[in-house]
Amino acid sequence: MILTDKKILESLETRQIVIEPFRRDCLGTNSYDVHLGRHLAVYTDRILDAKKHNQVKHFEIPEEGFVLQPGTLYLGVTEEYTETHNSVPFLEGKSSVGRLGIDIHATAGKGDVGFSNTWTLEISCVQPVRVYAGMPIGQLIYFLIDGDVETYYNKKQNAKYNQRTEKPVESMMWKNF
């Protein structure tokens, strides 16, 4: 079951959902719009290795924007820090962003109950496109869970993305080996 705007507001009041900063005008009928943070990152090596810690170079999006190039994976981050304790958040791209040829995630569109952080975006594009810090980039949709949770994501000993950050986080796949 997808939470409606009223249920999202109720969950915000009880802190079952946390969105910081929260802007009422970003609340849709059954979603919440999130915005591109000011930091992007790119991998320093052209060939990535799933068994190694692949390094990234972080940079800030200048005021005049930044032109994304096809064939490059950019890691972005949401301005919004979120927590979810009663639902599963799904991050989807906004249709206006998709119509510019921008994908905001390759595979990781679902969060876990207990996820508490900004969202790292896996950004790619089909043609050069200028993006700006603060622009609407995606929307969070919340699915209510059924049943008790044994281990929330933010309480897992082996969770790889628990450290709060304002910058995009590179793949930690290498920790699985």
Image (tube, grey):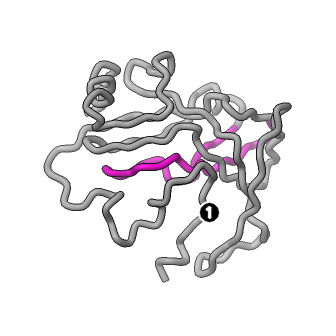
Q: Quadrant of residue 50?
A: bottom right
Q: What range of the chain is rendered magenta?
A: 102-129
Question: In the visual, does 26 lie left or right of 37?
Answer: left
25 up-or-down from 19: above or below: above
Q: Quadrant of the N terminus?
A: top left
- Tell which of 5 and 156 is nearer to you: 156
Which residue occupies 74% across, 56% down? 58
The image position of residue 160, as x and y in percent, is 46, 66
Identify the amino acid type marked 1. Answer: Glu
The image position of residue 92, as x and y in percent, is 50, 38
* Residue 126 on the magenta segment: yes
9 up-or-down from 52: above or below: above
Q: Which residue is mark 1?
A: 170
- Tell which of 42 and 16 is nearer to you: 16
Which residue occupies 59% across, 81% down? 51
33 up-or-down from 38: above or below: above
- Main SS, magenta region, reads loop
Where disc 1 sits, the SS reads: loop
